[in-house]
Each structure stands twice: as C-alpha cells, then as structure tokens.
Image (cartoon, grey):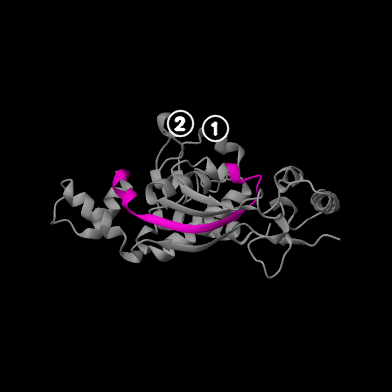
Amino acid sequence: MVKIKIVKPQIWNFEIVKGKDAWKEVVYGARLSGVSSKMEGKKVFKMIVENDYTSAIEHIIIKFDLKMTKGCSPEFLEHRIVSHTGYSTRYIKVSEGIDKRAPAFEIIMPWHLLKPKDEKTKEQRKIFLKNIEENLKNYEDFLSKGLPRESARYILPFCQAVGIYHVTINLRSLLNLLGLRLCVRASPEFRCIASQIYFNLIKKLPIMRGLVGCRGFMRGACPENEVREKTNCPFKNQKSKIYIPTIKEIKKGVKLKKFDEKEVLKAQEKIFKVWANWEG
C-alpha cells in the first residue's frame, strides 16, 4: 500500500536581501534620480510604491522556497520575471520528496474537499483519494517494471505536491504577483501561497504593511469590473465602510467615499489569514 501524506501549500525560508533596511536601497536610487534629500527616507519609499514608480523597487531582492501542486505550478511560472530552481520528477522518485527522513507521496487536497460539509462532498473526497491511491500504485508499478522515471511521472495526479521551487524575485515583480493573487478571483491554492508571502513580507519588511494587497487596495479602484460582481469580494458593497469601486463604476460617476485604509487593511488581513491557513 502506498503511503499518502496530505500537506498544505507552503512558503518557507523567506528572506529579504539587506533585511528590514532593504527599503533604503530604493531611497538611495530615488535620490540619484532627483528626489530631494529634504524628504524623509520612509516617505520617499512610500511615495515610490504608492505612485507606482516601480522600477526603483527592483533593487529589493526576495528569496523563498515554495511547495504547491504540480498542476497549479504553471500558474506560478506565468510570473515571468522570477528566477527559480525546481524539484525534478525526472530524476527523483516522487515519494522521496524533499524530506528524505520520512518518504511519502505528498498531495495537496483541493480547498473544497478539505472539510466536506455534506454527504455529496464526503463522497467526492472518498472518490478523489481512491483515484489518487490507484494512480500512485500504478506509478510504483511502472518503476518496479523498469519504466524510466521521466515516463512514469506522466501518470502522476494534478494534486501531487511536487511544484517545489527555490525562488529569487524582485519586489516589483512580487507586488505584481500579490496584486493578482490576493484577489478572490485567484485559485484557492494560489491565494494560500500569496497570503503566506504577504505575511512573510510585512514581517520581514514592516514598511510594506499598508502598501500591498489586492489591486483594488493598492490602486484604490478595482480593475475587475463586471467579473467582481460574480465573486464574494468583501469590497463590492457600496454601502459598506470598506467599499472599493471598480474602474467602470468610477467612469459611470459612482459617488465615492473616503477610502478607509485601516478598515480595508483589517478586512484584507482577516481574509488572508483564512487563505493562508488552508483549512477549507
């Protein structure tokens, strides 16, 4: 019987080159390009981020390790300005994983099957696990009968937790990633990854708190327009204190309210914690 271990999408070894002072690198570059020395450093940095003068923030380099499903990893690799080194299913037996002390086939359970709430989803979870076990038995059988790993891996399921990368990315590209993936429209697995990145980022570089979130938060207007109305976005209610208008609504002349940044930030982080915990 194959040993299957259910794991969560995960970020670890998160590091910012130059640590909490990395923002000073951006200020140094900004002053070279003409920003007055009379303007206080942190204000310069916030001005650069808020006004989207983002070529300057490419000087901040971030590194981390990442684990996600092989099926969802192409979504991550769509963020092109990122350097990565990945786990190879061509050369490594999948059950060996990265923890050689406890070999197992690691899988990531889909968000909607983590905590089945009715008989229908309980049955779906049961069928899901049965299929995974059958696939992995066949994978083992292929290897035992001499099929090369590079061909045996073709039977591996979408949920296999072998989308493992060591990543180097600059802050400009990371903010682009977070703006897109901290949105209710993003896939649940990528929202989990993005939320973990978010909390690591504001912990390691505290000046970023209040400057990063979904695109609606960062821009003060959501670019999703009609699509947002089909989601459970908490910022779409015009009567709420945390309403963020869409660009289309602004063009139509919607009455704007004062942007309550603290309330919106609080609401965002509450959602991000749920996504990061990956509990369904």
Residue drawn at 38 percent across, 64 percent down:
206
Q: Secondary structure at mark 2?
A: helix
Q: Quadrant of residue 249?
A: top left
Seen in the picture, residue 37 relative to 152 is either above or below; the reply is below
Marks 1 and 2, the one that precedes in the sequence: 1
Image quarter in which the N terminus is found? bottom right
Mark 1 residue element: helix
Farthest residue, direction front:
146
* Residue at point 58%, 49% (across, down): 190
Please tell me which residue is depicted at 72% across the width and 65% down the height of the picture.
103
Q: Is residue 57 magenta?
A: yes
Q: Position of residue 254 (x, y in %)?
A: 43, 35
**Toward the viewer: 75 or 137?**
137
For label 1, the crowd category at 10 Å Cα-Cα, with few meaning under 14, some 14 to 19 and many 20 or more, is few
At which x and y percent is residue 131?
83, 48
Q: Residue at x 42, y 40 (%)?
A: 221
Q: Callout 2 environment at 10 Å: few (<14), some (14 to 19), or many (20+)?
A: some
Residue type (three-letter) at the residue carrying disc 2: Lys
Residue 195 lies in the magenta-colored region: no
The answer to whether marks 1 and 2 mark residues whose Cβ atoms lie closer than 8 Å is: yes
Part of the protein shown in magenta:
54-74
Q: Is residue 108 visible?
A: no
Disc number placed over residue 248 in the picture, else none: 2
Q: Please indicate whether residue 189 sits to the left or right of residue 31 in the image.
A: right
Quadrant that contains the C terminus: bottom right
Residue sitting nearer the eye, 156 or 43 = 156
Report x, y in % for residue 66: 55, 56
Q: Which residue is mark 1?
A: 226
Q: Nearer the viewer, residue 141 or 114?
A: 141
